[in-house]
Image (spheres, rainbow, N blue to C red):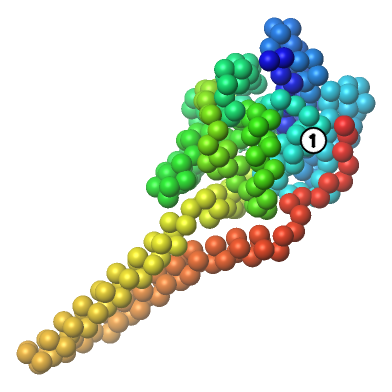
């Protein structure tokens, strides 16, 4: 095979403090790989501006003017990191590439691991997932919630590699398959793991954020996690059914016991506290289950409206 053309996809949201340095550093990697004859000279960067409110887009335009290998897309507003990534992958597919690597704009992921990604790609892998060596740079809270998420996903049957962020290489073949998945809220980590193509794993070091602050907060992380769960597992729905069944069985048995006690021992249970506790516990369980079902109804609602996944404003090719 000829040397593959590599496209590096970078979602950017309010990254004016990082973006120049990031592009510079990524070109060091790309030029190094070109000099080692590992990738084609046509390899390029593709930045997706996810509706930044700062000067990110002006900086990107300037970078594009000086170097045609910096290609870019701008959204009309913020659509979130998953949409930006998706748009990036679709964008490089239409421009043309043999493989695409997605990496964060703050370069928290070690960009020099791309060389190992390419080696795995040349060995025949269609998907190369980056796995963090550790989570030293994350807060305890983020480590804990991430662990809960990966464990829950695995219990629910949607196996995604632990400590994998969206730092990965995907082949042209994987990008073509991605086009067939038309769901609006595609959870990319789930998709690339489920699709069944040959996958390799590469470990990399995590660095602290280059500049600026994290663009994720608790609510957006919860949203990502819930979308991941509801789009890749129906186990919670079954759990609701099973729980309902056992609760009904429990109620029935308590009823039978009460009747028997009344007939043979003539004592009927009294207790206001018992009633209130049972009411609260069962009321709570019901609302919780309703919430789970609601998440799925919400998922159906969002998908059925069939709105565009994102809206492009400008594309610099
Ligand atoms: N990002 C984005 N849209 C958003 C939020 C984040 O495109 O709404 C990008 C952001 O610019 C960065 C990547 O997603 O390139 C990861 O975000 P961040 O580094 O803030 O997250 P963290 O590393 O803290 O999880
Ligand atoms: Mg980051």
Please indicate, yes or no, whether residue 47 appears anywhere in the rendered image: no
**Residue 195 as seen in the image, left or right of residue 242:** right
Residue ID at (18%, 83%): 256
**Residue 204 as seen in the image, left or right of residue 151:** right
Residue 103 against residue 217 in the figure, above or below: above
Residue ID at (80%, 43%): 52
> Circle 1 sits on which residue?
94
Q: Quadrant of residue 167?
A: top right
Q: Quadrant of the C terminus?
A: top right
Q: Quadrant of residue 207?
A: top right
Residue 168 on image: x %, y %: 61, 30
Residue ID at (71%, 8%): 37
Residue 135 on image: x %, y %: 50, 31
Looking at the rendered structure, the number of numbered marks drawn on it comes to: 1
Residue 135 against residue 50 in the figure, above or below: above
Crowding at dot 1, Cα within 10 Å, few <14 / some 14-19 / many 20+, comes out as few
Residue 151 on image: x %, y %: 42, 43
Q: Quadrant of the N terminus?
A: top right
Residue 56 against residue 121 in the figure, above or below: below
Residue 189 on image: x %, y %: 57, 40
**Residue 121 as seen in the image, left or right of residue 88:** left
**Residue 86 as seen in the image, left or right of residue 133:** right
What secondary structure is found at the residue carrying circle 1?
helix
Farthest residue, direction right:
65
Of residues 195 and 36, the one drawn nearer to the viewer in this rendering: 195
Residue ID at (65%, 28%): 171
Of residues 158 and 51, the one drawn nearer to the viewer in this rendering: 158
Farthest residue, direction front:
1
Please indicate, yes or no, whether residue 183 appears anywhere in the rendered image: yes
The residue at label 1 has a CB less than 8 Å from ligand 1: no
Farthest residue, direction top:
36
């Amino acid at each position: 095979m000829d040397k593959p053309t590599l496209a590096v996809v970078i979602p950017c949201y309010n990254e004016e403090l990082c973006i120049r340095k990031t592009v510079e550093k990524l070109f060091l990697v790309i030029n190094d790989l070109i000099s080692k004859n590992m990738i084609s000279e046509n390899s390029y960067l593709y930045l997706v501006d996810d509706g930044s409110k700062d000067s990110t887009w002006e900086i990107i335009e300037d970078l594009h003017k000086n170097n045609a290998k910096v290609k870019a897309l701008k959204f009309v507003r913020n659509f979130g990191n998953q949409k930006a990534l998706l748009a990036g992958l679709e964008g490089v597919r239409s421009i043309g590439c043999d493989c695409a690597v997605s990496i964060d704009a703050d370069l928290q992921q070690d960009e020099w691991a791309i060389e190992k990604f390419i080696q795995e790609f040349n060995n025949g892998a269609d998907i190369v997932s980056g796995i963090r060596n550790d989570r030293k740079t994350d807060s305890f809270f983020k480590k804990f919630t991430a662990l809960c998420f990966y464990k829950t996903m695995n219990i629910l049957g949607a196996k995604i590699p632990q400590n994998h962020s969206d730092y990965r290489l995907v082949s042209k073949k994987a990008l073509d398959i991605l086009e067939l998945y038309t769901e609006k809220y595609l959870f990319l980590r789930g998709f690339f793991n489920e699709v069944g193509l040959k996958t390799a794993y590469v470990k990399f070091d995590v660095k602290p954020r280059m500049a600026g602050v994290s663009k994720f907060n608790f609510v957006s992380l919860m949203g990502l996690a819930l979308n991941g769960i509801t789009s890749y597992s129906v186990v919670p729905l079954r759990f609701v059914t099973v729980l309902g069944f056992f609760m009904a069985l429990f109620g029935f048995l308590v009823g039978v016991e009460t009747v028997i006690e009344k007939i043979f021992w003539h004592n009927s249970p009294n207790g206001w506290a018992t009633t209130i506790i049972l009411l609260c516990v069962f009321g709570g369980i019901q609302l919780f289950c309703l919430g789970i079902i609601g998440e799925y109804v919400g998922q159906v609602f969002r998908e059925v409206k069939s709105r565009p996944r994102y809206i492009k404003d400008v594309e610099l090719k």
